Image (cartoon, grey):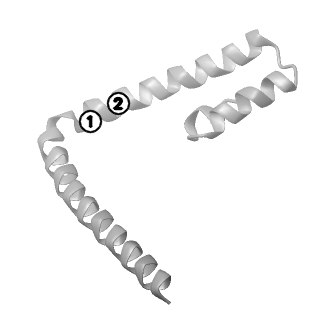
């Protein structure tokens, strides 16, 4: 249960499984609280360490956003053309 908090998508499934397995609410809350506390501390440390470089990080994200947008448009165009061609055959 502890590690499930750090894996996207797994936490929800394990909460349902913990309920189905009749895990005590107090035990679930304790493990989830400990994991949340550790996660908060990690993100605070990351923010403190990388905070001064936020402008540089924002520039990288902006460049990546443009690339991803162009790649998504190109992929959509390729799929659309492939479907149009397949429907003619």
Query: Which secondary structure lies at badge 1?
Result: helix
Can you give x and y, in whole percent of width and height, for residue 86 in the image?
48, 84
Q: Which residue: 75% across, 28% down?
A: 16
Q: Outermost residue, top direction?
A: 26
> In this rendering, would 52 be left or right of 48?
left
Q: Which residue: 66% across, 30% down?
A: 2
Q: Outermost residue, front direction?
A: 88
> In this rendering, would 66 be left or right of 23?
left
Asked which quadrant contains residue 69, the reply is bottom left
Front residue of 17 and 33: 17
Front residue of 62 and 44: 62
The answer to whether residue 18 is above or below residue 55 is above
| Residue under label 1 | 49
Q: Which residue: 42% across, 85% down?
A: 85
Label 2 neighbour load within 10 Å: few <14, some 14-19, many 20+? few
Q: Which residue: 46% across, 86% down?
A: 88
Can you give x and y, in whole percent of width and height, for residue 81 in the image?
37, 79
Front residue of 81 and 31: 81
Report the Cα–Cα distance between label 1 and label 2: 6 Å
The answer to whether residue 84 is above or below residue 65 is below
Query: Which secondary structure lies at badge 2?
Result: helix
Q: Outermost residue, right direction?
A: 21
| Residue under label 2 | 45
Q: Outermost residue, bottom direction?
A: 89
> In this rendering, would 34 be left or right of 46?
right
Can you give x and y, in whole percent of width and height, for residue 49 in the image?
26, 35
Pointer 1 and pointer 2: residues touching (CB < 8 Å)?
yes
Label 1 neighbour load within 10 Å: few <14, some 14-19, many 20+? few
Task: Name the quarter where the N terminus is drawn.
Answer: top right
Can you give x and y, in whole percent of width and height, for residue 30 in the image?
68, 14
Asked which quadrant contains residue 3, the reply is top right
Asked which quadrant contains residue 80, the reply is bottom left
């Amino acid at each position: 249960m502890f590690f499930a908090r750090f894996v996207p998508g797994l936490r929800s499934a394990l909460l349902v499984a913990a309920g189905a397995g009749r895990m005590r609410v107090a035990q679930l809350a304790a493990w989830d609280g400990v994991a949340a506390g550790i996660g908060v501390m990690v993100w605070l440390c990351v923010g403190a360490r990388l905070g001064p470089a936020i402008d540089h990080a924002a520039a990288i994200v902006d460049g990546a956003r443009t690339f991803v947008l162009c790649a998504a448009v190109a992929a959509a165009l390729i799929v659309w053309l492939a479907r149009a061609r397949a429907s003619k055959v």
